[in-house]
């Protein structure tokens, strides 16, 4: 193919989708574009085999060394339009399968291409997109991912589904650290990792929650010895499931799984469309993650409770921090066990991940999924005590999440010694609130009002266990004739 038979009419138009190939067509280039500027768009994604510039037509053709590099480049610039000298550039697949550079002009271009490519590799870096989106060619292909504002469960499979849109995901390790769900994810190369980080950092997996915070890991590779719900090597289907011992299984130093670690239960996707899942529309639209919370039962089994202290109302208030509790049943013959029915499966997962292993009334409680799809109300012939052990809260005014888009979705945190107080009557003094908690037997370590809003405050108690007890006792406590105190866990400290 010579320069003369390359034209806009022979490449993909905006109305005809070409199939992926190694040859890319660049349009609307500056009239005096240089080979260096064109290559600056492409070299971060892989080696460029051939280059033809049509300066009179403000176009260029690139042939990448591999189709994978071309696909990665097109995918990247679909979500991040490249610019040269503040002018948007359009990139698409060409209808040509390869470029021929047999005339003298194009042979000279290939000499320039070789010189520029060698210089780029020697320098070790190349600007991506012409606007300083830097990619260090020695950068790690391993990303460290933190999921903030975790309202819906995020599993290993969800991460693989999202990140594989940007390249080949080889390995994933998930763990919990500092009460945050985190992951290490290894791509096949650093270009894919850079592409994913640039596109996904700061994005929400679901609308209004589960925000991704992404950085490069110091590790150059992950060593995964077991394939299970916490770690996966997608290149090794033969690996055993093993035991979840982090230090042994992962080949890297990781903290032990705490109470907020996800149980190895949720690994099947429902295949639901996004429209079928309330509150899971992806924002912003340019990142189409297309993931749905897994389908599981919404009933939890809570065991090792203190039968002398626990009540349906107590569990309603505590589990209500993480979702809208519908029914609670304390088992008549085994009062250390209870069933808690949440509004939906994702709220059940959230409550389980945050409350399993916490201490309540002196006992470390265990929270797991129940096999029961719903909590049954007592039959008419049940005794008075048995009826009192089961309560229906479906019509409660204390549900925190019944309003779509409520700001409560953005303030879900693990149990902590610091409580967030809101709906405080104005004017109120700190001593009144301190006395309220002290009179309930709680040790107030610190207190402060929010500077801009004295209807909210932080209160730090002696321990997480004490804060849990205080939240149960004082949430919805009437402070004046028409205002009730709202209590939740805070991520802040005083």
Image: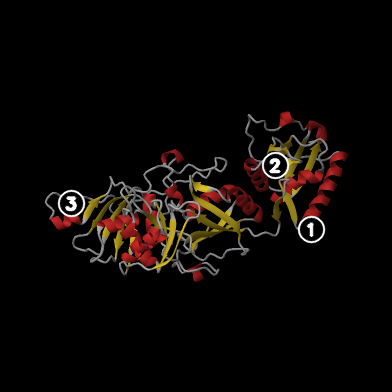
Q: Residues within 10 Å of mark 1 (few under 14, many from 20)?
A: few
Q: In which quarter of the image is residue 463?
A: bottom left
Residues under numbered marks 1 and 3 in contact, where contact means CB atoms less than 8 Å apart: no
Residue that numbered label 3 is attached to: 378
Q: Name the residue that disc number 2 marks.
A: 82
**Image mark for residue 122:** 1
Q: Position of residue 148 (x, y in %)?
A: 50, 55
| Mark 3 Cα-neighbour bin, 10 Å: few <14, some 14–19, many ≥20 | some
Badge 3 or badge 2: first in the primary sequence: 2
Residue 417 percent coordinates (x, y): 42, 65
Q: Quote the CA–CA distance across marks 2 and 1.
A: 24 Å
Q: Residue 386: where, in percent of width, then height?
A: 17, 57
> Which quarter of the rendered picture does the N terminus lie within?
top right
Q: Compare marks 2 and 1 and give the one earlier in the sequence.
A: 2
Residue at (62, 56) in percent of width and height: 188
Tell me, yes or no, if residue 142 can be seen here: yes
Please report contact status of discs 3 and 2: CB closer than 8 Å, yes or no. no
Q: Determine the CA span between mark 1 and mark 3.
A: 76 Å
- Label 2 or label 1, whichever lies nearer to me, is 2
Q: How crowded is mark 2: few (under 14 residues within 10 Å), some or many (20 or more)?
A: some
* Left or right, residue 313 beside residue 30: left
Circle 2: element type: loop
Pick whichever, 479 or 354, lies toward us: 479
The residue positioned 63% from the left and 63% from the top of the image is: 220
Residue 271 x, y percent position in the rendering: 43, 44
The relative height of residue 9 versus residue 381 in the rendered view (above or below) is: above
Give the mark nearer the N terminus: 1 vs 3: 1
């Amino acid at each position: 193919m010579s320069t003369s038979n390359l034209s806009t009419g022979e490449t993909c138009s905006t109305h005809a989708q070409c199939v992926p190939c190694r040859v890319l067509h660049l349009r609307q280039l500056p009239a005096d574009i240089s080979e260096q500027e064109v290559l600056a768009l492409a070299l971060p994604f892989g080696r460029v085999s051939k280059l033809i510039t049509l300066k009179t037509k403000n176009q260029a053709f690139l042939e990448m060394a591999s189709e994978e590099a071309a696909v990665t480049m097109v995918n990247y610039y679909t979500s991040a339009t490249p610019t040269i000298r503040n002018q948007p550039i359009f990139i698409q697949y060409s209808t040509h399968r390869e470029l021929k550079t047999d005339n003298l002009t194009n042979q000279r271009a290939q000499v320039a291409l070789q010189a520029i490519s060698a210089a780029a590799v020697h320098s070790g870096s190349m600007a991506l997109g012409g606007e300083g989106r830097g990619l260090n060619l020695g950068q790690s292909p391993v990303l460290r991912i933190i999921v903030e504002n975790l309202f819906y469960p995020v599993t290993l499979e969800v991460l693989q589904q999202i990140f594989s849109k940007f390249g080949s995901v080889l390995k994933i390790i998930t763990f919990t650290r500092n009460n945050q769900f985190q992951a290490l994810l290894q791509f096949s190369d650093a270009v894919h990792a850079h592409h994913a980080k640039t596109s996904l950092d700061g994005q929400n997996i679901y609308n209004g929650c589960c925000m991704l915070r992404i950085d490069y890991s110091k590790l150059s590779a992950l060593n995964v010895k077991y394939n299970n719900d916490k770690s996966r090597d997608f290149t090794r289907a033969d690996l055993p499931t093993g035991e979840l011992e982090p230090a042994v299984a992962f080949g890297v130093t990781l903290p032990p799984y705490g109470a907020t670690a996800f149980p190895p239960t949720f690994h099947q996707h429902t295949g639901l469309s996004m429209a079928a899942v309330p509150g899971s529309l992806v924002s912003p639209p340019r990142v189409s993650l297309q993931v749905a919370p897994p389908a599981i039962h919404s009933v939890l089994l809570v065991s090792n409770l203190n039968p002398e202290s626990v009540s349906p109302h107590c569990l309603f208030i505590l589990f209500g921090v993480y979702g809208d509790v519908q029914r609670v049943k304390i088992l008549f013959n085994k009062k250390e066990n209870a069933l808690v029915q949440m509004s939906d499966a994702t709220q059940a997962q959230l409550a389980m991940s945050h409350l399993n292993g916490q201490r309540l009334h002196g006992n470390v409680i265990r929270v797991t999924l129940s096999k029961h799809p719903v909590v049954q109300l007592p039959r008419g012939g049940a005794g008075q005590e048995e009826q009192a052990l089961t309560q229906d809260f479906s019509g409660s005014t204390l549900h925190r999440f019944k309003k779509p888009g409520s700001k409560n979705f953005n303030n879900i945190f693990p149990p902590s010694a610091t409580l967030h107080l809101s709906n405080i009557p104005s004017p109120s003094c700190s001593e009144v609130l301190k006395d309220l908690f002290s009179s309930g037997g709680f040790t107030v370590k610190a207190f402060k009002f929010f500077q801009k809003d004295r209807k909210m405050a932080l209160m730090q108690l002696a321990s997480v266990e004490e804060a849990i007890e205080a939240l149960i006792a004082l949430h919805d406590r009437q402070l004046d004739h028409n205002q009730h105190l709202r209590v939740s866990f805070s991520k802040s400290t005083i």
